[in-house]
Image (spheres, coloured by chain):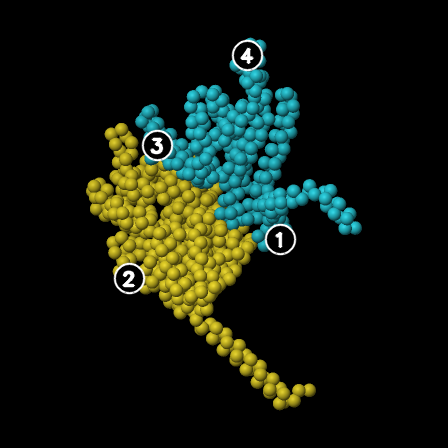
Amino acid sequence: MYARIKRTLCRERIIYYFIPAIIVLGTLALYPLINNLWLSVHVKSGQWSIGNYTRLFGDKWFWNAMLITGKWMLVTVAGELLVGLLLANLINLKMRGTKLFRTVLMIPWMTPMIAVCTVWAWMYNGDFGILNYGINKLLGTDILFLSSPSTAILWLAVVYIWKRSSFVMLMYLSGLQGISEDIYDACKIDGASWRTQLFKVTLPLMFPVIRSVLLISIITAMNQFTIAYSITRGGPSRSTELMQMYIYNTGIAGFQYNYGAAASTIFLAVVLCLAVVYIFATEKAEEDAF
Amino acid sequence: MLSAKKLWSMLLCLTMLCAMVTVGASAAASEPLKVQGEIVVWYSGASESRVDLYEWAKAVIEKTYPGTTVTLEVIPMAELASRQMTACQSGMGPDVMSQPIAATNGFMKLGLLEPVNELMARAGRDLLGEFNPDFFALMRDGDTLYGVPQSRTALALVYNKAMLEAAGLTEAPKTWADVQAYAEKLTQKDAAGNVTVYGFALPGTSGSHIWYRLIPEIWGAGGDICDAEMKTATLDSEATRKALEYYCSFYQNGWAPRSMLENDQTACSQMFASGAVAMTIENVSWIRNNILKDNLFEVGVALYPGMSGTNTAGLGGWNACIPASAKNKEGAAAFINLVTGKEGMEKQLLMPALTEVLAAGDWTDSFYGPYSTMLADHSRDFPAFENAAAAQNVIMNMVQSVLTGSATMDDAIAGANAEIQALLDEQNAE
């Protein structure tokens, strides 16, 4: 009997290696997730109810936050993809000073987000911000960066792209440096143009990296909170109220824990669906690329 | 069948037992506090003086009651209310909570606070006798009190004396019309047409900052955000229209900073301190800490101008409370006794709440005098919204919609009224 148990334990011991991870994940991810779900289907008094969800679907500010988050995701992910790729290509040129340039480019990424937001908020200020001062001196006009509900989100996106691009650049750079020089040499011998090399060699070979980085970018952008909270507080007229901020305002600052939990559950489902759709869609594209 | 002797013996025992319980209870009510163990205190540390005050109280407690330790935990102001609420609801709260007065009512209604009458009486305090009884309006249920006032403030108008004198304005504005006329006169431009000094600054962001500055204007115009029973929203009124028109007129006429939509009151006050703004509405501690302390310039203080006279300002300030889940309630009471006693009150930069200290000479001079008058004669509590943050956001959104032109004034007010009504319905349904 003892020998059999011992044999079984020895045979299946691989599972033991997962136990710490299961404990940590279970404590830090699974339990909050289940607790959040439980909260969302109860009201303050503790009674079971789906009232939080029905209320949520009629809440115009929830949909407003969802729409703004969607726009935010599109602008920031596209922005950091383009800027990151451009910077990675520049760094990959192997010219003198690129190491220094690469280090300098990492500074925004290394700077704490709250410090970045504070500085940018001051730079954007319509009365004493350096950006407005410069524009006024050069062009004799003013741009009230954060005072217009139609453009404030774009100026916040600039801060986000500026901050995140160096991380994205680093990821793309690792992908670029993984492409063998021999392939480019062969292309040159075959007379392939710069454009052909980019679209037929670089981008297809970079596709796995781009695919992963894009997924990270989408999830990170959708979960963004600090920029809107610290620069515009969601204003003006709730035009920069991202979903995370909406959840914070209703659930935490507004003490409506159950309602906030329902909002975050719906949002989690949206992000999850988006991620799954993205993974399946790009999987096919990746297969086609090769 | 019980004999008469036995019956009398039983009655006698019962009487003695009742007498012992009563005597025991009254002795417990009058016996001094037993201070021992650890006292955990959560406060915001929002100003230097508050840190000094709490450190002083900690040192006194630890010296007076050897073996007792006081653990001070500074919580960032922005997180204070939510952190306290979460901790109290999960039964993991501290022993002492310092909180803004707007928060206490909600905690009390949810049953998260310990009554303080008996505990403070054992510390030798007569709360209703020592403080203005109105200060307890939102933290009492009949005779039961749920907190001790630590400070009370009411906003007033502050102005740069030299700027007013240079513009030939010899006295402070008293009404809306005065403020608008002064703001226009005080706004200065350079040769290129760029504004160098704005006449008046009001916040265009931060819910609580706008709330404290717009609701008094609505009161001043004869309106309110909701009825006294807090059942019906009354924001959609002529008074709100007038107040909102007045509030936004400074921005729309170029007398307030063009960055108004980006500025909370701290930014407005920083512009005032730097000489870029001539007048604003600010509390006593900010002006004292940031302008008077460094002697930047001479600040004039005037009663809060209303539509046709002095406005009624909304009461602000701090309370010290004991969570119902506190583990060391007697120690907490001893700590609160120190912080809200005469010596503690004198260490505050905020306006003290204790009548005896407030009436002393320091608080009646030309700088503090208008603040004291506002507090004593022209202040009231804001309606006690359980979800105060949401109500404040509704008001902020209404102001921003008008300032940005994204909604007409009527639409902005009607939308805000509907949202306030929804908050009231939710509050009354619970």
Direction from residue A171 to residue B188 in the image, left or right? left
Local SS, label 3: helix
Q: Residues within 10 Å of mark 3 (few under 14, many from 20)?
A: some
Q: Chain of mark 3?
A: A
- Tell me residue B331's x, y (percent): 45, 64
Residue at mark 1 to residue at mark 4: CA–CA distance: 71 Å
**CB atoms of marks 2 and 1 within 8 Å:** no
Local SS, label 1: loop
Q: Colour of chain B?
A: yellow
From the image, which quarter does the C terminus of chain A lie in?
top right
Residue at mark 4 to residue at mark 2: CA–CA distance: 89 Å
Residue B78 can be seen, yes or no: yes
Give whichever of A53, B288 is nearer the camera.
B288
Which chain is painted in cyan? A
Residue at mark 3 to residue at mark 2: CA–CA distance: 47 Å
* Earlier sequence position, callout 4 versus callout 3: 3
Q: Residues within 10 Å of mark 2 (few under 14, many from 20)?
A: few
For the point 63% across and 87% down, the residue is B6
